[in-house]
Amino acid sequence: MDEKSLIEMGFKDGQVIFVSVSAVRPARKADGHGPASYRLAPQIDKLPMMLLLNEPHFENLFNLLQQLSNLNLSNMNLNSQEHFGLKSKAKILSRNVWELLMVIPTNLRILNGLENAANEPESGDFSQFFKPCSPHKLMYCLQVVEHLSDQSIMNRKPIAHHGEGDSSTTQSDEPSPEFQQMWHQKFISQGGLKHLFEIFMSGSLQLKDTDEWNEWNQECLAYLLRLLSRFAVEDKENASDEAKQSEAKPANRQRSDKCLIPKLKKTILDTMVIENVLKILMSIASDAAIPSCSLSLHSGSWGRAEVVHFALAFLVSAAYSRPDVQPVFCSLPNLATWLKTLVLDAPEPNVRQEACQGFYRLCLGQAPDGTTGYAFLFPILKSLLLYLNTAQGMKSTHKQNGDNMPFKDSYGAGCMDYFWLVCRLVEAIKTEEQGQNTEEESQIDLNELASCVGEYIKKKGYVETRHNSVEDDSLIGLLHLMVAILKHNTAFKCSTDGQALLEDVCECLFALPNRVQRHLPKCKTPTSRMAAIDLLVELAKGSISNYVLLHGKIMKQHSKEVHSPYPWDYWPHEDIRSDCGYVGLTNLGATCYMATCMQHLYMIPQARQSVLQARCSLNDYQGTLLELQKMFAYLQESERKAYNPSSFCKVYTMDKQPLNTGEQKDMTEFFTDLISKLEDMSFDLKELVKSLFCGVLTNNVVSLDCPHVSRTIEEFYTVRCQVADMKNIYESLDEVTVKDTLEGDNMYTCSKCQKKVRAEKRACFKKLPQILCFNTMRYTFNMVTMMKEKVNTHFSFPLSLNVSGYVEKNLMKMNRGEEEDKVTEDPEMDTDDECYEYDLIGVTVHTGTADGGHYYSFIRDRLNQSENGQDKWYLFNDSEVKQFDAGQLAQECYGGEMTSKTYDSMTDKFMDFSFEKTNSAYMLFYERCKPGNKPNSSPVQPDKSDKDIVAKQSEEQIGDQPRLKFQLTEDLADWIWQDNMHFLQDKNIFEHTYFGFMWQMCAYLPTTLSKNEEDRKKIHLLSAKLITSFVLETLIHAKEKPTMLQWIELLTKQLNQYQEAGEWFLNMMTEDDWWPQEILIKCPNQIIRQMFQHLLIQVITQLKPRHVHLYHHPLTSLASSESGELQPIDPMEIGNESCVTRFIKKMLAILNSGVRANSKNLSEYFMFLYEFAKQGQEECLFLLQISTITAMIQFYMGQNTQDYIEVLSDDEDDDVITLTEDKFRSASLEKMITLIAKLVECSRTDRQLNLSDSDQACLIGGKGLPFLYNQIKDDINLKQTCNLIFSLTRWNDELAVNIITMVFSGISRNGSDYSQREPFFKLLSLLVEFAGGPPGLPTFTQYVMQHFWQVAEYCSQQCLEWISQQVTRNKLIHMWILNHMDTWVESYLLAQSNPRVRSAAAQLLIALVPSNNFRQAYRNSRSIASPMKEIHLSNEALIIMHQIYGHLLNLLSRAKDYADISLYGFNHLLSYFGLMTFCLLGRNEKLMFQPYFKDLWDMFQPRLSEPPIPTNHNKQSLLIFWYQVCIDCPENIKLITQNMHIAKNIAFNYILADHEDQEVILFNRCMLPPYYGILRMCCQYSRQFTRILAQHQNMQWAFKNVLPYPVHYMSAVDELFKLMKLMVVVHSDSSDDEQQAIELFKKRTLKLFLEQLDAQNSWQAFVMSLKILITTDQDRLQLIFNGGLPKISDALFTLSMTYHEATACHVTSDIVDLLNILILVLKIARCFKEQNLLTYVLWLHMKLVHYIALTFPRQTLTIHLNCFSSVCCG
């Protein structure tokens, strides 16, 4: 058959296969056979797996298993390795055979036989199935038995392990539960269980003394014990789920504190001999625990752990079933040794776990009837404690499974499970029975045990390390054991030994390492630290003395004296040294080039040693060398993640400039510059650089025509490698040493022969350095684009480099004899014995483009190798350092292209998308191999004595060189370890485990101590001190503090529960204001400041009932003088009797201690004082008595602030913001103003303020009220400022006048700055808008208006805008402004030079009208020319509007003075006329204009009409107003037409027709329509005016220059055409003179159009003018004789093109109109016989007919064409 497995076809697990059903299969060869899928299925009994069920095949499988399991190799001459290999292979083959048995269906003979044996006693014999001599068949039968009994109990694969494969044909349905239960009972009743027990007791499956225990025997024995444990126990319906769970496979079972143990059945108990059973069970467990060969391969799924599990499970059930088991078991002589073997010595962790779990169930289990195993506890515990010393001395067996993977147990003895079991047993000792003098209990003295364990803890060595640490299982176990012992409240806890233990545990947790004792502390891993913390909690639990001792030690850690101030959002675990042991360098912006270079240099051991030991001989580089040494010392010794090289960048100069951290530099240039400076620092460093990096290159010129050779020598530090068009580094080296022939015009001039000769030129390596550095030339300059580009092509390099082919002695064959040039050479350049093999030790990678990118490095560790001897590579990427797989170097460093799959939605396929990698190697570092060393091997032999931190090895040997010493100077060592101590202390404190410990110290432990009231107060005070110090000194600085709210609640509760705690809290901050300043002032986190402020207020509130009567002491106490008179105490002593008032005084004193630098954070500070004042009148009076107002005002004004200079360290980024420059000043000082206002109001009694002299002087003293002036200017809470002013000015009108004067003075003083004046206007608004209020308030509105116009002279616009807002809100101001228009309207609406002021004045006049619609309409009007919408005004509003409008009309006579352009410009009257235009709501307003018409005309003529000004906006606004006032008002029009002077001169108006200037076009577009509109309305009402205007030359100018441009002036052109129509109208009563004048106008105008108008471009004006002017035959003849027909032809041509190209129908009407005119003209032409005219007419006819027929639709123009043809042909 041609079927194959998926593996053979190449498929993998999880692979997705797409099957196309409709795919066409390729045709097979015509062999007469179709595919296998077409054939009939074979018979079932012919299948291979069914054939295997038949004999002898089935029996042969078991025989094969037996032979493979008992493979005898003693007769073969094999070594141990070959012997082990064959044995292992035999085990694997046997397992494969067994898996085959599991796949095929269950053997019917065995299955039916077992069924019949249980159902038919006479025919059943279990011995034929259960044969111990064949463990494989026995196990097979046992699985069948289990399957027949109950599948639901099984934890293994039920079908596969019982032969029920996919091809089973014997049993398709599962057995019913009734059948299973019946077969189960029958199997037991027929002796099946007894037979299994006999096999067990026979020992046939156990380990023989002479042989190795076969794994098949182990697995079969485990399965046998499994069935015994299942069949021998009581029925499951009588057992709980936990009893059923105990039979589960050990791997799926978890430890439980409550275990229900099932008992054995009576049938099995009767057959048991306890001594024999115990002996066999213990022997089985012991044999399973200790394998004979630790290297043997275990291929089965059941092993030694299962044997131990089920053996102990059977033992436990037996112990709980028969009482005589306990004395026999406990009296066994080898019990202790047996326990040690299982619990400590067993090398497999699973075996130890199962053993401990079994003993735990034995001692602490419980039978269904209530029987317990407590009697086993003391004997087993006693036996286990015999080996406590052995257990505590064991080493940990954990190992780490790869990088950052969790630790797991390795093969070997271990103590972790031992301590777990001992701890559980000790915890289970019943406390109430300890007083009874039983024999067992008397043998275990918990106090003595505690002393012993404590001594072990104290003497325990230092095993754990800070990096890649292995947990110390013995230490952790001892700590847990001590906790378990102390839970019984032994006397040891409160003894001196207990206190000594507490101190030792504190040392284990909190001892700080130093440069001598680097191994401290003892507990470094999270597990051991957690165990130690649990022990501390247990020691302090219930013991006041221990708690006090522990409290004192913990308090020291949270005192500001023992540590530097913590930064905010601090979490040291983010800054911890990398697990690989190396320290990174912080990127300061663009310093990655420096970081990679320094890491390469540091990782070269010789360079590291020389730099650390160097002494600078030049003062110029002393600072640089010192910073370099500090950097290397930090990289070697620091516990932090990365070093900040800012100090190095400040002292290092490149191109005579300090390093700019924001400017990226080339890494090769920096590397070359650095080693050059190292050469100049000292002689030793110069020798180092020469030996490590300096090589010699020779340039050789060999003459071909003479025997001479010329050589020049030069040194190099880096080799430049060409990358473009190169595949690898060898090709690049070939390019460096390529031979170049000099011939022809490029011949070489021999210095010896003095003649031109042919020569060969070549560069060679004369001497190679120890460290060979290559610079790959990845950057090129593109001469086409003139830009720098990066070459990203593929360029490979090997791990081992052989450069022998590029040295001089191999490239240049010296066969010139004595003719060769003699060159003086250094003896060191003799390279005969030099090695040319180099190993790659580092790569610098650049990712990005030629304009910018990032550098990082891959560097090989030459001091340490992995456990398997391989080199370790690390990635150094700025501050990140981690291990790197060297196998990925090609992918990361070679460059080239990368291919990825991308989905193409168009083709619905995944396409390959290739793109260039931007990351590629930029610098390569190779190190010379020592002679005899293999390439790629590490040249450094590591010293593995200290594996804590790789870089901390002080002495290493490199090859054959002397040992290197990385010793630091005393100063450097002290500097770095001082930093390490602080950092490690912070790391121990800033962690969640420690936070949990502190919670227990503060919240839990105090509740477990004495119930005595005095002791409770003492403990509570200690707890309050601790939580206060911890929260305020540590917790609030942490970055991760998810339980911050709970801590604050607990702290508040602790301080409020007892007043002594709150008093201590306030007294402490009174003595030292560190916390208030750090938290309330300097903390950048507003939430933290708010929490602290609320905490202070709550504490003070809680203390108020007890302290409020002391707030004013000793002010109320009067002392007697010598004269007997009573005198008050010094005010400085006020409030000293209470901690609350003392603290408030201290808080006020903070204002004088440099808080201005953090002025943006003062909001919560003043909020605290304000909340204190809100508590009651007593608090306010106290604040007044201690001159709080004076202190705050002096702080604000800066009168009492000491000069300070705040120096920030280089690491701090916070900006110091002075108060005058603080943009947050307004928000942070708002509560200060609120507090001052409240205190001022609280000082009032009746009509007088009882303020102190100092407070009053600060508030309202000084010239110009400086405090009020400055805080108004700073815009600080103006609403509260207004309240403060109200409080100060009640019943004090004089002060109110002074304040208003000050406000207006501030407005005048800041007249040039709009933003600085705005707060003053806001305050004025608050003052005048306030309504109601308490009695005694002055009338601020009156005072404001008295000074208003004086101030308006300085800041007119803002004053008018402000008053515009107030007139709508304040009736008094409205009335005052309206009644005094004579004093201000002309000044600000006409006389002002600032257009914004004039606009504001107009807005003010509009605001006077009490109509929101009216005001809104004015604000929304886009221009003065926009049409007015109908606005309905109330009678009141209409009266006021008429009053304003009338006043504006009265100003017309004086407005003409402001039309002088030489004085006021062209825009001065825009607001004036715009406002009057807006007031024209109806006919009444237009009639009001009549008396002032002469004033308007006098302004227009000649001031505005005659001056040749292109864009006079005054004239424009006047004409718009004039036009609007004449619409629908004939009375105003008659004023023009009836005045002959005006009628004759109104047409004189200067207009510039510049159609290129956009400004002029826009101006004319607004000015011409109203102007021509006025003329049109005059013509409509006066025929005389029409005749006068028609004869005016300006009209002909307008027809010539304006009419042809309808696109520019659409409205003006419409008005001109309307005028033209009026001028050609002949009335029925027209006189002959009028008719002649009309004809003359038409003739002159038509001639003008025909001569000047371009009919093609201005066809609209042409057609419209013809329609107006051509009305009679005379006009048509005039058109013909003046050349009008060609014009018509041009216009028709343009119209046809327009119609054709735009396919628009809007020109159709124009075409029809033009053709109508043309038809009438041609009719007149027929009357004339001039040959020239007829010829022209015929030509025109043919031309027009041609393009008209092609262009226009016949449906529209057919009649016109016919008429046109008939006219022409006729």
Image (cartoon, rainbow, N blue to C red):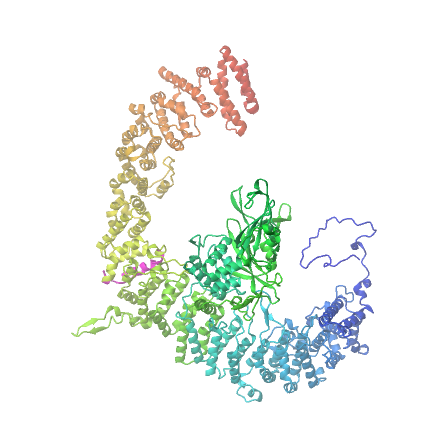
Q: Quadrant of residue 1618?
A: top left
Instruction: Residue 1576 in the image: state x and y as whole percent.
Output: 37, 26
* Quadrant of the image containing the C terminus: top right
Q: Is residue 1088 left or right of residue 490?
A: left
Q: Quadrant of the N terminus?
A: bottom right
Q: Is residue 1231 magenta?
A: yes
Is residue 471 left or right of 1510 when viewed as pictured? Answer: right
Residue 632 percent across, percent down from the top left: 48, 63
Image: 753 above or below 93: above
Position of residue 1539 relative to residue 418, above or below, is above
Work out whether residue 159 can be spotted: no
At which x and y percent is residue 393? 57, 78
Quadrant of residue 131 within the rendered picture:
bottom right
Relative to residue 1711, is residue 1425 drawn left or right? left
Q: Residue at x 53, y 27 (%)?
A: 1699
What number of labels is visible?
0
Tell whether 1231 sits left or right of 709: left
- Extreme front residue here? 818
Residue 635 shown in magenta = no
Residue 1027 or residue 372, whichever sits in front: 1027
Q: On screen, 1644 above or below 815?
A: above
Question: Compared with residue 397, is residue 1443 higher up or lower down, i.e. above or below?
Answer: above
Residue positioned 78% across, 67% down in the render: 170
Chain part drawn in magenta: 1226-1252
Residue 1138 visible in the picture: yes
- Image x and y of residue 1233, in percent: 31, 58
The residue furthest left is 1123
